[in-house]
Amino acid sequence: MKYETVEVGNVDEFGSYEMTEAEMIAFAEKYDPQPFHVDPEAAAEYPYGGLIASGWHTCAVTMRMLVANQFREGENLGSPGVDELRWHQPVRPGDELSVRVEVTEKRPLESDPERGLVKSTVETSTADGTVVLSWKSNVFVRRDPEA
């Protein structure tokens, strides 16, 4: 993402990532070991009716797709955080995830002429279009102070 070329209203859609049961369990065992994330039999007793991915795993997969597709040019300079993080629907084994990013705002940083702030809405969806995750992204981006 280059500050000078990104425009408010730009939409980028990318990624294809299959969530596997083994990966979901491995992630959850390490970072979020709740029964509905780590034990398929126990998960059946919860309101979800089966194993679901940790929301943090879904966030990590989304970030991986963002880095691979949107931040690949090295213009990303980190983030002061995200807003309005929401898990809308559970992610299940076999779900194929993709990402949609819509730029909602951009502005130069007054404190640093070589950086700008780009705000976007990020949505992660399954192959059938169900939104499973969303957040408001705030990303520092390298900019040309002469532009």
Image: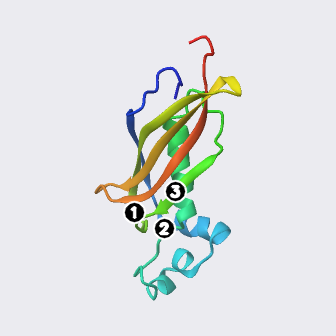
Position above or below: 15 against 24:
above
Q: Position of residue 118 (x, y in %)?
A: 53, 35
Q: Amino acid at mark 2?
A: Glu
Position above or below: 134 against 120:
below
Q: Which residue is mark 1?
A: 94
* CB within 8 Å, label 2 to label 3: no
Q: Position of residue 105 (x, y in %)?
A: 48, 35
Q: Which residue is mark 3?
A: 84
Q: Which mark is residue 21?
A: 2
Q: Amino acid at mark 1?
A: Gly
Residue at the spot x=56%, y=26% of the render? Answer: 73
Helix, strand or loop at label 2? It is helix
**Which quarter of the figure has residue 89?**
bottom left
Q: Position of residue 124 (x, y in %)?
A: 42, 53
Q: Position of residue 8 (x, y in %)?
A: 42, 32
Q: Nearer the viewer, residue 29 or 78?
A: 78
Q: Amino acid at mark 3?
A: Glu
